[in-house]
Amino acid sequence: NIIISVGEQCLLGANAGLGIPIGDRCTVESGLYLTAGVKVRLLDQDGQTVATVKARDLAGQNDLLFRRNSLTGEIECLANKSAVALNDELHANN
C-alpha cells in the first residue's frame, strides 16, 4: 500500500489528480490525472525522449513537471526548472 502524498512547494493544476506520491517542487498540469500504471515519456532538456516508464517508477521523486502533449495526448515528464511562488498578498488571509 502506498500513501498518496504531495511534497513541499508543489503545484497541482485545476482538476488534476494523483495516484502516486510526488516529491518536492513538482508540477502537475491542469486536468491531468496521474495514475500509477500510466505510461510516461521522460524528456531531456532538448525535449527528446529518453525513456518510457510507468508513473509508479517516478513516485516520490523531486523537481518533476508532468504534462500532456497536446498533439499526441501522451503524458510527458521533464525536469521542473521553474520555482513556484505564491502571491503573499493573495494568501494573506489564509
Image (cartoon, rainbow, N blue to C red):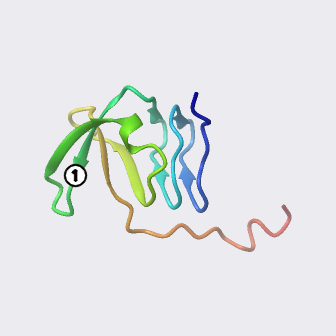
Where does the image place residue 78, in percent across and percent down from the top left? 30, 54
Where does the image place residue 11, in percent across and percent down from the top left? 55, 54
Disc 1 target residue:
43
Question: Looking at the figure, which quarter contains the N terminus?
Answer: top right
Q: Label 1 neighbourhood size at 10 Å, few (<14), some (14-19), many (20+)?
A: some
Asked whether 50 or 31 is in front, the reply is 50
Where does the image place residue 44, in percent across and percent down from the top left? 20, 58
Asked whether 68 or 6 is in front, the reply is 6
Residue 53 is left or right of residue 36, and the answer is left
Residue 88 is left or right of residue 81, and the answer is right
Rendered view: 88 above or below 9: below
Q: Residue at x 44, y 53 (%)?
A: 61
Farthest residue toward the front? 1
Rendered view: 55 above or below 6: above
Rendered view: 55 above or below 28: above
SS for tag 1?
Answer: strand
Question: Looking at the figure, which quarter contains the C terminus?
Answer: bottom right
Q: Quadrant of residue 52?
A: top left
